[in-house]
Image (cartoon, grey):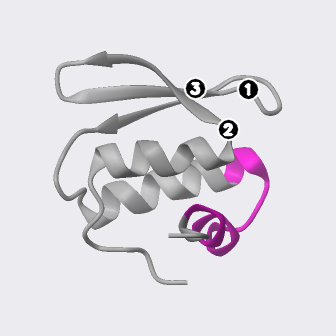
């Protein structure tokens, strides 16, 4: 599945709430999200508009590995209902 190219850091943080992440802190232009699905997992997301494709791809890969699902399945779950 193709990665959306126009997503901002804030939009991504909101979408990641669907898979168990929550905003735990914000410093300057970065947001820290934490999930506790199977142990804690932390992510730092820049508040850029839009996120660079490589940055977005790396974040999605990291989240998919943590959740033990494919990146395509993660994208489906995030974009479901939008």
Residue 60, image x, y percentages: 52, 57
In-front residue for pair 30/78: 78
Instruction: Report crowding for label 2: few under 14, some 14 to 19, many 20 or more residues within 10 A (C-alpha).
Output: few
Residue farthest along the right direction in this orientation: 38
Tags 3 and 1 touching, CB below 8 Å:
yes
Q: Kindly identify which residue carries mark 2.
A: 20
Q: Kindly identify which residue carries mark 1.
A: 36
Q: Which mark is residue 61?
A: none
Q: With 44 as the anchor, is 27 left or right in this view?
A: left
Q: With 28 as the anchor, is 30 left or right in this view?
A: right
Q: Depth-wise, is mark 2 or mark 3 nearer the camera?
A: 2
Tags 2 and 3 touching, CB below 8 Å:
no
Residue 12, image x, y percentages: 41, 51
Q: Kindly identify which residue carries mark 3.
A: 34
Q: Quadrant of residue 26?
A: top left
Using the numbered discs, state the Cα–Cα distance from disc 2 to disc 3 in whole angstroms.
8 Å
Tags 1 and 2 touching, CB below 8 Å:
yes
Whichever of labels 2 and 3 marks the residue nearer the N terminus, that label is 2
Q: Which residues are magenta?
A: 65-78
In-front residue for pair 4/56: 4
């Amino acid at each position: 599945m193709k990665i959306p190219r126009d997503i901002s850091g804030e939009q991504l943080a909101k979408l990641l709430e669907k898979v168990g992440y929550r905003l735990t802190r914000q410093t300057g232009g970065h947001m820290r999200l934490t999930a506790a699905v199977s142990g804690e997992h932390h992510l730092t997301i820049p508040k850029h508009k839009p996120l660079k494709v490589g940055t977005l791809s790396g974040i999605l890969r990291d989240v998919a590995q943590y959740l033990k699902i494919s990146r395509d399945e993660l994208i489906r779950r995030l974009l479901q209902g939008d």
